[in-house]
Amino acid sequence: MKLSFLGALLIVLTPAWLRAQGMKCDSPYEKLHRQIELYQGTPKVWPFLKRYMDLARAEGNKAEIVAAYKEMLHECPAKHRLAYADSMLVAAKTAKDDDLIGASYLTKGILYYKDNEHQMALDNYVEANRYLVRSRDQYLRHKVKYSIAQIKFYLGYYQEAIALFRECITYYKHEDILPYLKSLHGITVCYILTDDLQQASHMNAIALEESARLGSKDMLPYIESASGIISYKSGDFESAVNNLSYALPLIRKDGDYPNEAITQFFLGKSYWDTGRREKAVTAFKAVDEIFLAKKYLRPDLRQSYEYLIKYYYNKQMRDQELVYVERLLKADSVLGREFRYLVSKIHKEYDTAELIAEKEEIQSQLARSHYSGLLLKGAVGFLVAAIAYLAYRQRRLKRLHRQRFEELLAGRPERLPAEQGKNPKALTINPVIVIHIRNKIAEFEHKRGYLKKDITATKLAESFNTNEKYLREVVKAERSKGFTNYINDLRIDYIVERLKAEPVLRRYSNGTLADEAGFSTTQHFITAFKKRAKITPGYFVKEFDKLEVNPLV
């Protein structure tokens, strides 16, 4: 039975994995596992799963209990999988094994991701990463990286996703074929959505060459779909139709509805731009059907509704036009909750005011022939209020981001070296010691000692010839923050100034910027940047580049 990479991600813990930790190969668990494999996917597997669990519980073997829940999760109906994942996590925590706990969180995250619960998926991926960050199991750690890359891609943080996909490509190239090819496809799509078609074509070509070299056809439909999208964006609409039409039935056969929606969307756009409007409408309606059935929609796929509204407007089919105006409003509401920042960046042909005006006109026409005026007024009033609220929130968020960018550009007062506590004299430490530590801190900041990756309060206190408690108290009094935030803020202020002064640095990945600023991981850098600047590194770089292209007079 062919297994998708998403399915492979779920198979993190197996008796084979556990045997690698020191168990004997001919254990009763091994015999049961062979029987489970024999009846996998059939009702006959359950007696063996029950015997597996009974044996693990009788022996008090926590790791095997986790493995039993994992096996049951694969065999149970979809609606029960999260319950088994929760039981697996409880057992893993009882075992007090970080790898088991991290893998269990990863499993939960993958289940949520498959159900389009992206925020819940990300929460569990982050927890998995917390337990696995020091794991020696590199394969498991890169499964987390791949999963987080998928979430970042979905949310529109393409540069951050690219950095993670690159790590996965490097690792999986010599470890596992399918995740390697999946990572190549992931980075290709990221480049497509950043309109870097040269890099997108390059990575897609590598994916095709590697598929041929490794003898794997699993990713061929996705590579063809990506080729079609690149052709569309390059203006070669006929090639786009050919590639996308080839890929669509194969992707649909896999049950991969997110990629089916994406392929249908670009197929619709290709048909539309070549005048085949009826075929385009069929494709756009397929995107709508996936949204209704699976709740899946990306901000760029939203444009399907704009095409459908245009089509039925020109046909003077007001009933159908109204259906898709309402669907567009619903789509914006969903996207507004999950893509608060990203939605504001997507070009909208039908902005909120135009949508409201058009809806009122349609409603007015239909009211005269079909509906009661009072009912329509109430519905329109509710929609206007809801849209106005969403529009207000989007404008407010955009203003806040812009305000934070301008503050960083100008240099916030709190970022200056004189960032002092209000009452340093309240310290109970000997004033002579306070002055000594204060001078050492000034020297430390001047020499940029904070760029050392292994800096800790203990090490810094030793270098100051004082103790950690005194150092933390003086930092708190002098800089009005805890030691960790103090170090992180210095690093972020440093990298912000360099980004402003060095254009070449703005082309670096977040991983490279993290290294330049002294952070041990990309994740820590991004988190610290958001906390300090209240915007992402990508947003800052993009806005600064715009400023250099169109300088303020």
Image: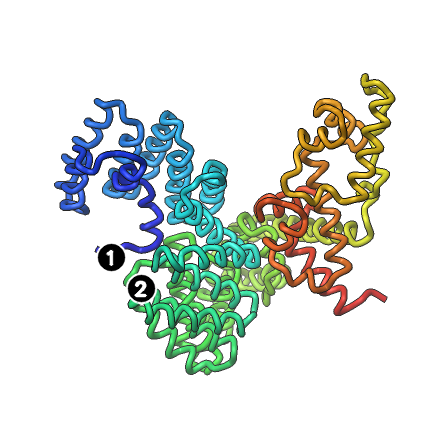
Horizontal placement of 79 versus 439: left or right?
left
Quadrant in the picture for residue 364: bottom right
Q: Residues within 10 Å of mark 2 (few under 14, many from 20)?
A: some
**Residue 281: % across, % down:** 42, 71
* Residue receiving disc 1: 2
Horizontal placement of 434 versus 215: left or right?
right
Q: Is residue 373 visible?
A: no
The colour scheme of the drawn protein is rainbow
The vertical placement of 89 against 214, above or below, is above
In the foreground, 433 or 265: 433
Rendered residue at 50%/37% (across/down): 130
**Residue 189: % across, % down:** 48, 64
Residue 319 bears which disc, if any? Answer: none
Rendered residue at 86%/21% (across/down): 431
Q: Amino acid at mark 1?
A: Lys
Q: Earlier in the sequence, mark 2 or mark 1?
A: 1
The vertical placement of 73 against 167, above or below, is above
Quadrant in the picture for residue 184: bottom left
Q: Secondary structure at mark 1?
A: loop
Horizontal placement of 430 versus 119: left or right?
right
Q: Secondary structure at mark 2?
A: loop
